[in-house]
Amino acid sequence: MNSLSVVQIILLSLFAFFQINEIITVGIGFGNPVNAGLIAGLIVGDMKLGLAVGATLQLMILGVGTFGGASIPDYATGAIIGTAIAHISGKGINYGIGVAIPVGLLMVQLDILARFANTYFAHRIDKAIDRNDDKAVVRNSLYGAIPWGLSRSVPVLLVLIFGEAFVKNVLNYMPQWLMGGLKSAGTMLPAVGIAILMHYLPIKKFGAYMIFGFVAAAYLNVPMLGVALVGVGFAINHYNSIIHDKNQSGSGSNGLDTEKAAEMGVDDKGVITGDEE
Amino acid sequence: MKNNTTKKTTTTQSHKLTKKDIRSANLRWIFTSALSWNYETMMAPGYVGSQMPILRKLYGDKPEDMKKMMRVQSEYFNTSPHMGSIIQGVDIALEEKEGIDSVDGVRGIKTGLMGPFAAVGDTLLGTVQSTIFGAIASYMALKGNPFGAILWMVALGVIYIWAYTWMPFAYKQGVNLVTSMSSKLNALTDSATLLGVTVVGALIPTVITLKIPFIFRAGKVSMKLQDIFNQIMPSLLPVLLVAFIYWLLDRKHMNSTRATWFVLILAIILFNLKVVA
């Protein structure tokens, strides 16, 4: 059992506020779960814990972005809360993952709320334009950062202020069947992320390369960076063949299979449907 | 010899933009593009806000034109954040040339380009980039090594510093840019997607650590089920699991959130039946 200092709780909440605004603008990735886990881990003083929680969550939404404004599970906030709770409880990585996944899934609702709240600023921009008030237009184009940030930092703050005592109580009664189950979920859940990603990528067109990648890793034990380099080699060849063969008009398709994404419940407004209840 | 001062002051355009104006618009776009993202006009607040230095320069002395152009620039707009700066660059070139007469052209460029650019940006800067770097980062992070996560942020930092040159480039090229780059961009997207698929193939055996502790007993002979699987193919279970979820996602009423809950519950059940470890 550990506890977090006030400073640590504030830092985690501020980071939650910052990471979402970073990911929707500059986007060098503070809001990618593995990086969010790394930073949360550094704040609580257990980097390896944060990395492992973040990495597992990262694998669950690998390659999935907020395309077209879709709300995706917020595993960055999940990683922050999961890392903090795992640290407080002292129950380790898989417990953190078990906490982080439901948090990330529930956070979708708050993501939608933030996007909805920002409509207010869009209306204020319309009114400012009527007045020809260009400064107000600029101001309102920035205020959206507040709903975005609060939608992430408030849950983190509340969970960490009230959660600590709660977590300690729950842990005393946490049955083994659930703890162990969450642990094995950690070994299976990355498969969900990969399966989702496979729906986004044209695996029918490039299926052969998937087999190359699999054989390299499973049979030859080539590390991931090595497999990526082999892939770069194939990609260079492919690029050159397209550029040289101008008759190949089939290259016009983009890589994302948006139709598939729609079938999976991301509608044309970009909102993940289902589970609204 | 004609006098140089009578050079170029046409009726529709009387203001020349400076490098500083472009830089200001560029930085504003990079740091604020989606801050006020909302369901009604999506990225429009970010667009009008970052376009403001240009608008003030071009229409600052003509309030009616200013109002008209602000209204156009605050209309629905949504694309991939970094690709948006290319669209804005082309838009600026057009507005500088034609002034307020460019209203229809600006609308055409923005609505015409945001879709295709979103597709390219979401594929390259969304899915492919995060599949490759995310896979490497997660793979290392699971072993407690933060290098992959840091590499990811550094790599994106380098890419996005380069992206800073896109708006000035697009501004210089103007409308011609669109036709000249589209074929190369498609080839690049296609090749990068191939690389992404290769990495996904390698992900399956490396990050899904599902194992079965079940042991067959027939009289005195006992045999571990996991050993049998290993003899057929390394990582057979992860492959089957991914294939199953891939299939599951195609079923009716199934979406990614439900699939995640499903696997979470399945893992808890299988653990308690002592099928998985």
Image (cartoon, coloured by chain):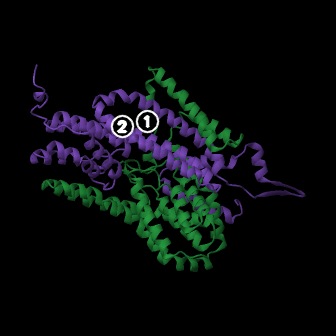
Q: Are marks 2 and 1 in contact (CB under 8 Å)?
A: yes
**Numbered disc 1: secondary structure:** loop
State whether residue A117 appears in this view: yes
Instruction: State which chain is coloured purple.
Output: B
Toward which corner of the image does residue B265 lie, by quadrant? bottom right
Identify which residue, B220 or A93, lies in the foreground: A93
Please state which amino acid type lies under the numbered disc 1.
Answer: Asn
Q: Quadrant of the C terminus of chain A?
A: bottom left
Locate residue A21, reporting x and y percent: 39, 57
B114 up-or-down from A185: above or below: above
The residue under label 2 is B116
Examine the rendered structure and indicate whether residue B163 appears above or below residue A157.
above
Q: Residues within 10 Å of mark 1 (few under 14, many from 20)?
A: many
Residue B250 visible in the shown view: no
Q: Label 2 is found on which chain of the structure?
A: B
Q: Is residue A164 above or below residue A19?
A: below
User: Residue B204 at what x, y percent from top left?
Assistant: 63, 46
Q: Colour of chain A?
A: green
Q: Chain of mark 1?
A: A
Name the residue located 25 percent from the left edge and 38 percent from the top edge.
B91
- Asked if badge 2 and badge 1 are on a common chain, one would say no
Residue B94, position as x, y percentages in the image: 22, 34
Seen in the image, is B224 located left or right of residue B168? right
In the shown orientation, is residue A53 left or right of residue B271?
left
State the quadrant of the N terminus of chain A. Answer: bottom right
**Which SS class for mark 2?**
helix
Q: Residue furthest right?
A: B220
The image's mark for residue A254 is 1
Dot 2 surroundings within 10 Å: few (below 14), some, or many (20 or more)?
some
